[in-house]
Amino acid sequence: MLKVVERVLKFRDERGWKKYHNPKDLAASIVIEASELLEIFQWVSEEESYEEARRNIERVKEEVADILIYLIYLADVLQIDLEEAVIEKLKKNEEKYPIR
């Protein structure tokens, strides 16, 4: 994952885009891209969603990548260590939802 984060940030920095990145706009971009992902599955049943994903796998992959890219940008501007944040959240979830 670290290589992906480094590559995403390098791409941004080479283009001078960081000056346009603020928490509000990056959060909005994450929601917009997530909505584009959701649009793929609009009006299909839960069962049909698997076939819809297979039929549109390239578009699904692009939207998932866009979401991750904006999430990496947001974590960077807020100085959030993504790996640490995920591990901390998993620990909280383990306490909240123990194995039964």
Image: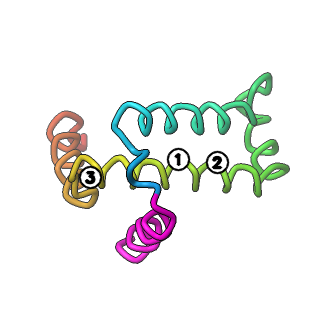
Element type at marker 2? helix
| Dot in front, 2 or 3 | 2
* Residue in view at x 34 percent, y 37 percent: 23
Mark 3 — residue?
86
Image location (x, y in percent) of residue 17: 46, 55
Image location (x, y in percent) of residue 88: 17, 50
Q: Which mark is residue 63?
A: 2
* Residue in view at x 30 percent, y 55 percent: 76
Q: Quadrant of residue 35?
A: top right
Kind of residue at disc 1: Ile
Kind of residue at disc 3: Val
Mark 1 — residue?
67
Image location (x, y in percent) of residue 9: 41, 66
Q: Quadrant of residue 65?
A: bottom right
Is disc 1 in contact with disc 2, using a CB cutoff of under 8 Å?
A: yes
For marks 3 and 1, give the CA distance: 16 Å
Nearest the eye: 37 or 77: 77
Question: Is 92 displayed left or right of 46 in the figure?
Answer: left
Element type at marker 3? helix
Is disc 3 in contact with disc 1, using a CB cutoff of under 8 Å?
A: no
Q: Residues within 10 Å of mark 1 (few under 14, many from 20)?
A: many
* Residue in view at x 58 percent, y 32 percent: 32
